[in-house]
Image (tube, rainbow, N blue to C red):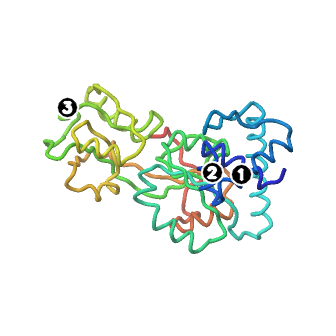
Amino acid sequence: MDLEDLRIFRAVVREGGVTRAALRLHRVQSNVTTRIRQLEQGLGVALFIREGKRMLLSAPGRVLLDYAERLLDLADEARAAVSEGVPCGRMRLGSMESTAAARLPPALALFHRRYPDVQLELRTGPTGRLLAEVAEGGLDCALVSGPVQDARLTAIPVFREELAVVAPAGHPPIRSARDVRQRTLLTFEPSCAYRQRLEAWLAADGVVPERVVELSSYHAMIGCAAAGMGIALAPLSLLDAHAGTVSVHRLPARFAETSTVLATRSGNVGPAVAALVEVLGIDLQDAPERALGQAA
């Protein structure tokens, strides 16, 4: 068993099967299958329960996954420690989907040009889930909605955002939550900071949603709003590409204004994360060490 075996094993777990893991690792499927079989034979246990094309972790597999995560993290730390501060190895970046779509592409393109030895893994999700992954070591850093309240984390302000209500094209002006005609909310899961803010805006006017529909992407969310299914909340930076298909309604500043912060584990800004901070144009000398308060 070597680190590459563990890397392949972890990829199969994360991707839910050999086919997607092979694509992620840029390997042929048969090679991934063979390496998993050899790993199982070497350990003398079945790491997966195979149900057709599905591969579910067995009890020994869950034990190995915990060790694999720690060993691979240690290997990355060791590589960074001996590289004299030169960014290299793997960096696991989390991001809200809106930030990944509207803000990150130019920054990541620049990052890849400057630091080709860093293997960047980008995962999108809602603020609550991403913060939990950073705190537990599953991510090196994440772009989330601030402020952040967790003594284990450092939050560095990166972007200012203005949130707006998205409704079908032609919807009358929305000056308060009582003006909303279709009171179905199109949102992400409950740990989404923007969902919590939308619910707070409605509650402030005593409006109770008739229904909540949870979606997994802004593309679907805005498409459903355009079709008249309900309303959503999104950053203005994301909405330029959808001009004409939906109506956009500004909110009072206390609900509209928010910041996107880069959250890391306190004291864990390694070379790769520091390089990302540089590319994003953040001055660490001016940035506060920790942004406290309840996540929006």
Q: Which residue in the protein does label 3 denote?
A: 178
Q: Are marks 3 and 2 in contact (CB under 8 Å)?
A: no
Q: What is the secondary structure assignment of the residue under circle 2?
A: helix
Find residue 4 and report its image quarter: bottom right
Q: Which numbered tag is attached to residue 254?
A: none
Q: Which residue in the protein does label 2 denote?
A: 21
x and y percent of residue 56 in the render? 66, 34
| Vertical order, 81 against 146 (above or below) | below
Q: Identify the amino acid type marked 3.
A: Arg
Q: Residue at x 72, y 47 (%)?
A: 9
Q: Which residue in the protein does label 1 denote?
A: 8
The foreground one among 197 and 195 is 195
The local crowd at label 3, few if under 14, some if 14 to 19, many if 20 or more residues have their Cα within 10 Å, is few
Q: Residue at x 46, y 64 (%)?
A: 105
Q: Identify the amino acid type marked 2.
A: Ala
Instruction: Left or right? Give the position of 102 relative to 142.
Output: left
Q: Residue at x 26, y 27 (%)?
A: 207
Q: Identify the amino acid type marked 1.
A: Ile
